[in-house]
Amino acid sequence: MRLVAPLATCVASVWLISLQAPSDSFIDRALPLYAVAVAVVALLEALRFGDAKLAFALPLLGVIRIAVFDENLRILVYGVILAVAVITLTARVLARFGRLTTREGVALVVVCVAAMKLVPFSVELALPQAIVLFGVALLALSLATREGLGAGALIVCLAAGMVAPLVPTKGSLFPLLLAAVLCALRGPSPFSIAAVAVTAAIAGRWAWPLAGLVVCAMLLEEVIGSVQARRTVPAALAVVPFGALPLGTGALAAATFSPESIFALPRLAMRRRHAAVAVALAALVLRPSLGALYMIAALAILMTDEESASDPRVGMRRGVPLVAATFVFAMLSLAGFSGAVASRFPLPLPYVAVALVALPALLAWPARRLPAVTVVLSAVALVAAVAYSSVVRQGTAIEVNEVLAPGESWELAIEASDEIRVEIAGGNLTSQRAGAPLGVVEAFDANGRAIQRNIVIGDVADWGFGRPGHYFAAHNEWPWVSDAKVAEYGNEAFFGGSGSIIVTLPSATRVRVTAATSLPRDGRVKIDSITVAHR
Amino acid sequence: MTLFGCFALLVAATSVAPLLVFRGALRVRFATIDALVSAASLALWLLLPRLAIGADAGVAIAAFVVAKLVTISALLVASHDSEDLAWSPLRGALLAGAVYLALVPFVVSRGPIDGDEPFYLLVTESLVRDRDLDLRNQYAELSRSETGRTDLAPQLGDPVGADGEQYSRHEPLLPFVLIPGYLAGGLHGAVATIALLAALGVASTLRLLEEEGLSRRATLVVFPLLAFGPPLLAYATRIWPEAPAALLFAEALRAARRGKRSRAGLALVLLALLKIRFALISGTIAAGWLLLQRESRKKALVALAFLAIPAAAILALYPQVIAVRMFDPEDVFTVRNYLRGFGGLLVDGQAGLLFQAPFWLLGLIAAFRWRSLGAATKLGIVAAIPYLLLLFPRSEWHGGWSPPLRYLVVFVPLFALLAASAIDRHLSRGAILAAATWSAGLSLHALAFPNALFQIASGESVWGRWVSAFWGADLSRLVPSAIRPNGAAMIVLVIVLSGAAWSFFRPERSRLTRPNSAVVASLIAVIVACGFTVARMPGRIVELEDAHVRRYGGELFPDVFTVARFRFRGGWQFHEATKASFLFAGGPSTLRYSAVAPATVEIGGRRIELPSTGGAYATALVDLPRVPGRYTLLCVKGDLVVDRIASE
């Protein structure tokens, strides 16, 4: 308690600095909230180690406010300070004790998710924000074992808090649903299954596949267990009734049984990792907003695997803390743009995400090999983020800002260029799925030669589909190549859905963009800009 | 070389060179961390445009290099007792040398060479092309010079021969040494020569640490700050004699310590030839070493008498030979000047150890235990005293137009010895970490903005100007300055000297009560918050050339490139209709100005007719309302230079 006064003094000083430095950015106005989050982390450090060295991050926040003038850079640095504080505490605790205590874990999770979700605070979002905070606290409790909370569990809680949508309000139930699922997996019972079913029913249709997969997995485990106990029916026959169930359960069964077991009764134990694989595979077929939620659910289920639960140091041996540090750093350092990152999390490429979860589990790699593997996969994941970021090309940029209705065309004469890059976004097209045609970009040279490139959802997306209020229900996919920049801050941040269409034609002198006639009546194709370059 | 080429070279140097010292499991660990840091940096760089954060590629490369160097340093320190660490002074020097050489094209590409650098290169070019030291044709054909500077002219004090030959006042040894590198690679080759000499200086210093019996841990903590920290990093890739001087100083101390006469003699002679001011150091080392030799003490005393009498006579008749270049020599040796130079070199925001090389200051304070110091350390301290006694009262104590701490770089080996000694005597880890973090920031600044290392010595510091310009408030007054002495300098100097006294007088084995981190952090937070609050209040004194003043027209007086600009009072040149606005306390005030002809200004609603001062500075009384706030000074008629306005 003797540390509370100095920490409170630090927070008050930061608050005083933010008062002295008025700003239009609500992230700057929320600087005291960041200070409180760091103060809590410092307090946790003091409770564990007797000294609060992380308290030095508090005056640093004030110095950053004073000395860094680029607004976005300043916001990024706030997040980096918070991220480094959390990682430093977690690393120290894990290195010495192997696990965070439940109290530490819950406190850390709540303050971090608060930093990500509570800015900006508005009355309309108060209920979903409260639900998310309550949900992540319960999630942390459900992931905690007798020994405490591991690094992997920390990732899952922070990730769940980050991606949980605030709009619609039902989406904010995701952490709560996940907590119910994990409790059910830990202790299957009619009550726990009912809790999952009820929570999923309230949450909405998006939650039903997750609940269904998990419940089926639990039922399958019960059936296999009872069949093995009775030794009366070949195990393979028990799978038949489940063949009609969703893909995930089929994969579960296939992964569980090997050919030689068809006519034998092997000693089988239903591994939660297989349930995790099924949920992860489901993420590939669902729309992107749900894909992230299901990926995190898969990770969470993996955390409850018996092997992890029984050995508190497995998390260390498997290199999970290093992965945890990478993801926590990425999440928290971008807390000032949490809304935009949430829509692109956990990874832009779900295939890499599946590999991170599924391969080590499915192949049961030896623990000693995992640290290097996870490091390599982390590095791949980080560089994969690069693929989602465009390399700005040199050239002459021309602002266009034309909007095309279905069937309309727009044309521009340009100086002779070899490469034309058109930034295009959709309008009122959030319901369009990947591959839906949007239009065509054509380039012509002086001799009449032409080249054409079709535009589909996946090349571009609706401009505002990444907005927190629209993303959850949208079916668009993020464009592969894009120059879109982040807009807004905090939980309102989003990346625009514009994509870059690149057409190459030596000495092209004219470019034409035509919107598809198959677009919805109110659908639009917006041409933001054109960049022409010589090779 | 393109920026990408520079980047590739730096990646190679910082990823491959450390493998010289890391082996086995440590090598795998380094490679893993290095890969993660590189991947994270790459991802961040490509993410920045998406976050609408504009980032200069050069700054990003500098940040990346510093991040890698921090990683290497942390791993070195963490594994100080590991068997997988293949550490030796040579390997450390090779690591440093690889980084320096990789930095050469990057630093050269960031801006033209400045200060005395181009003049050294001109002399080298003259030696190569003309086989002489006459620079007349070099000045006539500057477009052919590798310096890239077509604005060069003979410096103040450059000697002129009987037949009109134009010589440089700089000693020719350094240009001579640069010849092979210049022949091999022009400007890059010349800078690479300095980099190699700096690396040799690092090797020599590391050997010195070993020979003084300092622990491996202390050496490994000191090494990164020595090689990659201020001030040596700035001078390792610039054409100044300071880095070679550090090498010779270290070699002289080593040779003297081991009784190697010829080697010591060679190092001392070369040191004196490198720069005449280093002759004091050479002479003191020679005298001290001779006096310590019992068998030759009589001979030494006789030799000293033969040398000292004529030297004293020259000093008495021509003090300006040693002291300053004809800048008010009668004022040089005053108590005030001594205090200013001494205090400034300790705590000045732009030119002092506290802000420009805090780690060395820590070592200085904490190792004030004469008896516990090694022989070479004691000799080094003694050698430094006469040099410093003549440096403190100089008006150019801060180094002039050069990177910071120019006149102290020669003593970097001594600082390393003291710091390592302090570490072995349990210097606080927190203090080391804080100093190291600040030093990393300084290194980043030095690499990202090498030309920003040159400051006009106006009394402001780089970061004071940076913050003041944005907020339009005089935050610089809170930064200690000995160039324009302020209250902050006095307060900080008292604190630093108190720390030194406490370190000196406390019992050797007294138990230290570590201050609570949260309490210290809260103290810092309160200081920052209060300081910011106070700084945003209108001040009683406004210097018109300061960064917080918002100026609309006019120019700095005298020009920023004026030689020895610190000798001038300075100010802002106003012409008709130009104006400046600033936060000011108001009330009856004194306006200090200079005007060749009468001028009229308007401020705070008052029109003031200012008589001519004939070019000198004079003061005028201005009766302003006692209302603190933003005031605008408008030049209504005429031209004048306004230095400052001060509220009474």
Image: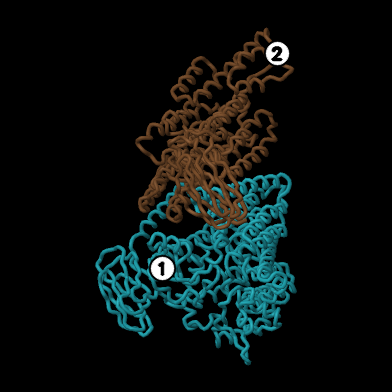
Chain colours: A brown, B cyan
Q: Which residue is mark 2?
A: A265
Which residue is pictured at 65% across the width and 83% down the height? B307
**Mark on residue B546?**
1
The reply, left or right, for residue B212 in relation to residue A100 is right
Question: B130 or B305, which is in the foreground?
Answer: B130
Residue B524 horizontal side relative to residue A219, left or right: left
Label 2 packing within 10 angstroms: few (<14), some (14-19), many (20+): some
Identify the disc placed on residue A132: none
**What number of labels is visible?**
2
- Mark 2: which amino acid? Leu
Looking at the rendered image, the quarter that the N terminus of chain A falls into is top left
Counting from the top left corner in percent of width and height, residue A197 is at 48, 19
Find residue B398 and report its horizontal and vertical position in percent: 52, 71
Q: Residue at x 65, y 53 (%)?
A: B217
Disc nearest the viewer among 2 and 1: 2
Work out whether B199 lies above or below A380: below
Residue located farthest toward the bottom when viewing the structure as drawn: B162
**Distance of label 2 from label 1 (alpha carbons):** 86 Å
Name the residue nearer the viewer: A10 or B610: B610
